[in-house]
Image (tube, grey):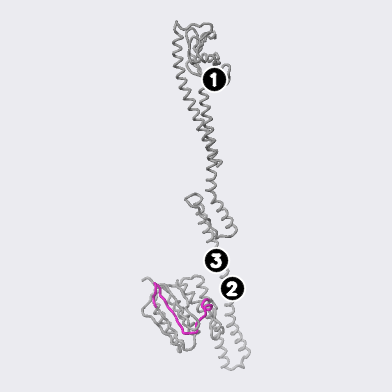
């Protein structure tokens, strides 16, 4: 507002100066033209031999202009016109020689007044001086200056009366923006700015700030989620290392104990006893070897090593796994339901491992004689394989953790019945490496159905 007021003042000053200058120039030009016209007439009259005589200084040329005829010796010979009673112009010798061009001269007895003077030479070294007072012209210009000053003052007053409320109203949303920014600085990232109406600079600023705040909030949330994931990952890694150490310690302790027992027996042990000890050591070593292989496989999958993916018939792989399951579990009714080939993009060896792990899990966690059904079909652009059992099922909490590494249900804590707890974790990791999904549909008393969905191959 101060800048606007200054601009109004400067504009008023420039406009007033130009107006006064142009008006003064116009009035002077018009008056000078009248002065030249009158001076020309007066010069012709005074140049005639029968020109009016001079009688004791009395004027013999009635006129409204100030008229003087100054002799070569500087004496006033003729003076005429009603304005002669006023103080005439005060002229110097140099000004008397400046003939033919009107000029301004001060009044003789009144320094505040001025005259417009034209000097013309006459015969005999005389000069005709004609002049008119500039009082009326100066008065007109002064009234214009006063009018300009009053107009400028009114303009500034109107600017203050009308502009200040408008500026305050237009900048009022900035106070809300300031309040919102203070709340956000205090930690409330969910705060947003109330958008002012209209397509104004403040409205566009509010929109831009809201967009920026949404981006910042999303970045903070992503950072917080990333930190939380990192903490959970570190916790899982520690738990994984602890579980792996525990699982490896068990067969190692068994092998060490059996070996020490065999050494203590020495030659006193019978051949049958030594064979039994060797079989036990071989069994624990094989168990430890399988555990190490599973851990290495999970480590490779975690490292993101690519699989050899190619078009594979999911139904054929499932049929091979079911046939092997019937041999391994002769007391179980393992059936296959596959109406047609389902071609997926997969590594056939790793896909077979997924199915074997699901079949092994179904057999281990269901009563003897409980049937297991393997179903293969295509649905919604994906190949789906499901392994359903008729076991006791899982609770909601158990189903949420069933794919965790080393997780075993309470009924499978014993090493004789339960495995290492890596079978389903490996199945889940292999499925994810294929770009697929695995889930479980279960409830206590109605068994469990594990479903694997893989993308179909584009043939």
Pointer 3: residues within 10 angstroms few (<14), some, or many (20+)? few
Tell me the quarter of the picture where residue 291 sits: bottom right
Q: Which mark is residue 114?
A: 1
- Vertical comparison of 93 with 153: above or below: above
The kind of secondary structure element at disc 2 is helix
Label 3 element class? helix
Task: Say which of 299 and 322 sits in front.
Answer: 322
Query: What number is the disc on residue 62?
Result: none
Residue corresponding to mark 2: 238
**Front: mark 3 or 2:** 3
Tell me: residue 236, above or below residue 88. below
The x and y percentages for residue 197 are: 48, 52
* For marks 1 and 3 on the same chain, the one whose residue lies earlier in the sequence: 1
Q: Earlier in the sequence, mark 2 or mark 1?
A: 1
Give the residues drawn in magenta, as a range.
377-400
Residue contact between numbered discs 1 and 3, judged by CB atoms under 8 Å: no
* Relative vertical location of residue 82 with respect to residue 364 in this rendering, above or below: above
The structure residue drawn at horizontal position 51% and vertical position 70%, both measured from the top left corner, is 303
Q: CA distance from mark 2 to mark 1?
A: 107 Å
**Residue 348 sits inside the magenta stretch:** no
> How many callouts does the rendering have?
3
Quadrant for the N terminus in the image = top right
Indicate the quadrant where residue 324 lies. bottom left
Which residue, given by chain and number where applicable, does mark 3 sit on?
225
Instruction: List x then y, in percent, for residue 29.
Output: 46, 22
Q: Alpha-carbon neighbours of circle 2 within 10 Å: few (<14), some, or many (≥20)?
A: few
Q: Label 1: state its secondary structure.
A: strand
Cα separation, mark 3 vs mark 2, equals 20 Å
Q: Nearer the viewer, residue 108 or 204?
A: 108
Q: Position of residue 160 (x, y in %)?
A: 55, 41
């Amino acid at each position: 507002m101060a800048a606007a007021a200054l601009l109004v003042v400067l504009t008023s000053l420039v406009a007033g100066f130009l107006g006064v200058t142009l008006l003064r120039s116009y009035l002077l030009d018009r008056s000078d033209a009248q002065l030249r016209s009158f001076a020309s007439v007066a010069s012709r009259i005074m140049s005639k031999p029968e020109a009016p005589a001079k009688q004791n200084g009395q004027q013999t040329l009635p006129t409204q202009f100030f008229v003087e005829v100054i002799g070569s010796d500087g004496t006033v010979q003729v003076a005429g016109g009603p304005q002669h009673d006023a103080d005439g112009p005060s002229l110097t010798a140099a000004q008397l020689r400046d003939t033919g061009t009107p000029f301004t001269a001060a009044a003789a007895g009144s320094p505040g007044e001025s005259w417009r003077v034209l000097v013309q030479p006459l015969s005999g070294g005389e000069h005709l001086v004609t002049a008119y007072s500039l009082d009326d012209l100066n008065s007109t210009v002064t009234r214009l200056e006063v009018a300009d000053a009053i107009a400028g003052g009114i303009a500034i007053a109107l600017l203050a009366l009308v502009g200040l409320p408008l500026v305050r109203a237009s900048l009022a949303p900035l106070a809300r923006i300031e309040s919102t920014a203070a709340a956000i600085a205090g930690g409330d990232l969910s705060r947003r700015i109330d958008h002012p109406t209209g397509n104004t600079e403040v409205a566009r600023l509010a929109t831009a700030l809201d967009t920026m705040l949404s981006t910042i909030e999303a970045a903070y949330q992503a950072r917080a989620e990333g930190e939380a994931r990192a903490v959970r990952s570190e916790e899982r890694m520690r738990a994984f290392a602890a579980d792996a150490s525990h699982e490896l310690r068990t067969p190692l302790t068994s092998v060490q104990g059996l070996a020490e027992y065999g050494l203590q027996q020495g030659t006193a042990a019978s051949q049958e006893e030594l064979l039994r000890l060797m079989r036990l050591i071989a069994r624990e070593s094989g168990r430890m070897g399988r555990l190490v292989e599973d851990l290495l496989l999970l480590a490779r999958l975690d490292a993101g090593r690519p699989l050899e993916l190619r078009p594979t018939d999911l139904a054929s792989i499932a049929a091979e796994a079911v046939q092997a399951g019937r041999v391994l579990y002769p007391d179980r009714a393992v059936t296959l339901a596959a109406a047609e080939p389902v071609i997926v993009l997969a590594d056939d060896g790793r896909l077979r491992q997924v199915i074997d792990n699901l079949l092994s899990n179904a057999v281990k966690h269901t009563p003897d004689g409980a049937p297991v059904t393997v179903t293969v079909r295509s649905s919604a652009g994906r190949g789906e394989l499901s392994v359903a059992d008729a076991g006791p099922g899982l609770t909601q909490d158990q189903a949420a953790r069933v794919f965790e590494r080393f997780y075993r249900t309470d009924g499978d804590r014993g090493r004789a019945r339960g495995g290492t707890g890596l079978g389903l974790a490996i199945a889940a990791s292999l499925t994810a490496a294929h770009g697929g999904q695995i889930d479980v549909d279960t409830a206590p008393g109605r068994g469990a159905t594990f479903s694997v969905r893989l993308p179909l191959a584009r043939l």
